[in-house]
Image (tube, rainbow, N blue to C red):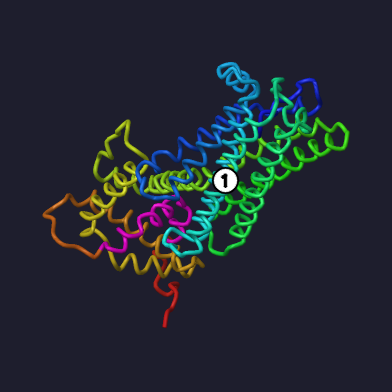
Amino acid sequence: MSTVLALDPSGLLGQLYISFWIPTVVLTAALAIKLPTIIRLWRDPLLRSVGGLLLLACAVFVFAAPATIARVNRITGIPNFAAPLVYSLLTAFCGSCLLLIIAWRNGLSDRSTGTRRAMRLVIWAYSGVIVALWVLFALAHAPVERVRDLDTYYANTPFMREETLLYLLAHCTAVLITSRLIWNWVRTDGLDAWLRWGLVCLGVGYALNLIFDAAKLTAVGARWTGHDLDWLSTDLAPPVACLSAILIAVGFILPHVGQFLHDRWRVRVVHHELRPLYLLMKSVNGSGVPFVLRASPDLRLIRRETFIRDILLPLARHIDEDLRRRSYDAALALGFPPGRAKALAAAVTIQDAVGRRSRAPDGSDTGGPDTTVLLQEIGAVSRALRNPDDLDAVRARTAAPAQDAPVHD
């Protein structure tokens, strides 16, 4: 990720070129997804660090784009002025990665001397690198603008040579430390599945940066020995950097988005599973839950659950507890496990109560059998209603002559 991140579109790897704007869009999306949480929990330094890191990563790719490089050079009137600017943004990004990992590893409550010393060391070291980059650029003589191959073109130029080497070593050091800490974390027991996969994406993304550094250093080193391996810098490093940025962005957003989608899917599944019992209760009430266009999935689930429970309560006086016990015994005799047998028995009992109610108009709302179990297990009862064959089998077994019924101790 430098001022030479453009590709030769006629080259083989150039045909596989990943646009600068793809990682920029992905990183921006990651920042946008995280932003509401960052604003809501602004006092959380970890969230602020994540936001700053994603913002710096976006800035790196925006300013490293060839069109932006040329525009910055033209606006400032200084050839290659974009070089120390991009190098500085990249160095700040590296420092932010290290600070974030230190905070993650030690936790927010860790205020030990060692942790504070490590964070101060990172801040001073990478701030010093940024200052040195600008000093070296001011001392260097680089009059020819190079949008694509500045690193290799000036590989033997005093001060520009040191500048290139400095930013690559700072980047490589940060990537090595960050990558190692992330992979150590991945192997930790008890991690949430979404967090683990997010860390894996981060680990792979940072590991790819090592390929970027190796390609750049090899190309520059080749110039020092009189050889030409510029394609490593101009054709290999850029797509690797872009892919790395995409994986890092995905790593940050995957735990958040994955958990969000998982929760939404769970709510929709539960809402769908309650449909059979909802329709049965709707036949009792005559009307269901009014449709609200802008109701969230959570609200629709709550309203469906509330409706079912509200109808079940008046049905209590029509519930035949003896029928439920006999249905439970019948379900066990048919080989159903206890939990499933209990749900089938409850479903048979509720269907019977609905029939009783239709034959005997409501009277006063007197107390009836305890419906606590039914109200707590409406999901299991609703799933049982989806299997009419099982219900018919339990009902038939329940209605069998007494001598055919199972004998219990």
222 sits left or right of 149 in the view: right
Decide which of 252, 81 is in the foreground and name it: 81
Give residue 222's quadrant in the image: top right
Give the quadrant of residue 381: bottom left
In the rendered image, the residue lying farthest to the front is: 139
Secondary element under disc 1, as helix, strand or loop, is helix
Q: Look at the image and tell me whether residue 279 can be seen.
A: no
Of 242 and 282, nearer the camera is 242
Q: Image check: 351 left or right of 186? A: left
Residue at left 43%, top 55%?
Answer: 384
Q: Type of residue at label 1? A: Tyr
Residue 219 in view of the camera: yes
> Which residue in the structure is indicated by mark 1?
126
Q: Residue at x 32, y 65 (%)?
A: 323
Residue 340 lies, with reference to residue 163, above or below; the image says: below
**Percent x, y of residue 207:** 68, 47
Q: Nearer the viewer, residue 9 or 114?
A: 114
User: Please, which residue is most extreme toward the bottom here?
Assistant: 409
Identify the magenta region.
371-395
Task: Work out which quarter of the rendered image holds the N terminus and state it.
Answer: top right
Q: How far across and how far down the image is residue 292, in percent?
A: 29, 33
